[in-house]
Image (tube, rainbow, N blue to C red):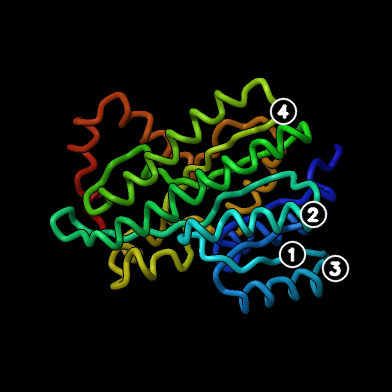
């Protein structure tokens, strides 16, 4: 079977840790060329060295704070000037803060929307003309099962994920006649440092430990889906089944899963 990733240049945001780091590794292992974006240049350099030593794989790094809207266009221009053609974009960077609505801080809400929504929208918008010009491309947005199932203490986080899922679904329809694939990745809890901010006291992690996804396995599934016309990746599968029931019978599901929904 032909390797659709070999020699393809893939932008990965939030590349310095967690799912993003493992996506970079699997892209490189498959013969692709990761273009890694994150705030921590030291971590990116360490990953770049690791990819070279373990896989003899070339990669590129760009330090950026994606929450600074004004910083995005210059970095995109630099990437396009440096590489000529980019083949894929994986919007992985994200942050969550779990609080009841009455306790939410506006700065936390704004931060979630800047990173989870606006940065992904801006990057997608900028690369659509580039992908169209070259007749190929793939945009993958790492979202969350929180986009489909509302739970207590995730009102703002869930709202940001609802927003980017809606954006992704509309974008897919707009690009249906182009050779540009658009995929939403909806995940349950993943064992990453995401929870150091979202759940600083560790209570939620402890409650869902047995359900947490392995970031390496998640990354492998995502990379295997590159350049395939796949609408969604939903993990774990049982949670996706639950979200489908929730969409049809929300009141019933909220009642019978009340204890599960209140684990944060």
Residues tagged 2 and 1 counted as in contact (Cβ below 8 A) = yes
Label 2, label 1: how far apart the Cα atoms are: 10 Å
**Circle 1 crowding by C-alpha within 10 Å: few under 14, some 14–19, many from 20:** some
Whether residue 147 sits left or right of residue 6 in the image: it is: left
Measured as percent of width and height from the top left, residue 173 is found at: 55, 23
Whether residue 205 sits left or right of residue 237 in the image: it is: left
Residue bearing the label numbered 1: 60
Q: Indicate the quadrant where residue 131 lies.
A: top right
Number of numbered callouts drawn: 4
Mark 2 or mark 3: whose residue is earlier in sequence = 3
Q: Nearer the viewer, mark 3 or mark 4?
A: 4
Q: Nearer the viewer, mark 4 or mark 2?
A: 2
Label 1, label 3: how far apart the Cα atoms are: 13 Å
Mark 2 or mark 1: whose residue is earlier in sequence = 1
Q: Residue furthest top?
A: 177
Label 4, label 2: how far apart the Cα atoms are: 20 Å
Residue displayed at 22% across by 49% down: 152
Residue bearing the label numbered 3: 56
Residue 83, disc: 2
Q: Indicate the quadrant where residue 23 lies.
A: bottom right
- Secondary structure at badge 2 equals helix
């Amino acid at each position: 079977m032909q390797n659709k990733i070999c020699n393809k240049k893939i932008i990965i945001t939030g590349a310095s840790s967690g799912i993003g780091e493992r996506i970079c590794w699997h892209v490189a292992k498959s013969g692709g060329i990761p273009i890694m974006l994150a705030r921590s240049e030291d971590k990116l350099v360490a990953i770049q060295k690791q990819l070279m030593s373990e896989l003899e794989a070339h990669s590129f790094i760009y330090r950026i704070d994606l929450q600074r809207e004004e910083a995005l266009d210059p970095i995109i221009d630099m990437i396009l000037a440096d590489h000529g053609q980019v083949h894929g974009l994986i919007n992985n960077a994200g942050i969550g803060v779990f609080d009841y609505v009455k306790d939410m801080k506006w700065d936390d809400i704004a931060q979630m929307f800047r990173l989870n929504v606006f940065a992904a929208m801006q990057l997608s918008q900028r690369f659509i003309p580039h992908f169209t010009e070259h007749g190929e491309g793939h945009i993958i947005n790492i979202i969350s099962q929180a986009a489909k199932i509302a739970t207590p203490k995730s009102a703002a986080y869930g709202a940001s994920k609802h927003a980017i899922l809606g954006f992704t679904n509309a974008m897919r329809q707009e690009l249906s006649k182009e050779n540009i694939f658009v995929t939403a990745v909806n995940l349950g809890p993943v064992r990453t440092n995401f929870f150091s901010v979202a759940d600083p006291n560790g209570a939620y992690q402890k409650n869902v430990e047995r359900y947490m996804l392995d970031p390496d396995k998640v990354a492998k599934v995502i990379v295997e889906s590159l350049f395939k016309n796949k609408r969604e990746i939903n993990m774990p599968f049982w949670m996706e089944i639950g979200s489908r029931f929730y969409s049809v019978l929300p009141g019933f599901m909220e009642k019978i899963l009340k204890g599960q929904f209140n684990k944060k």
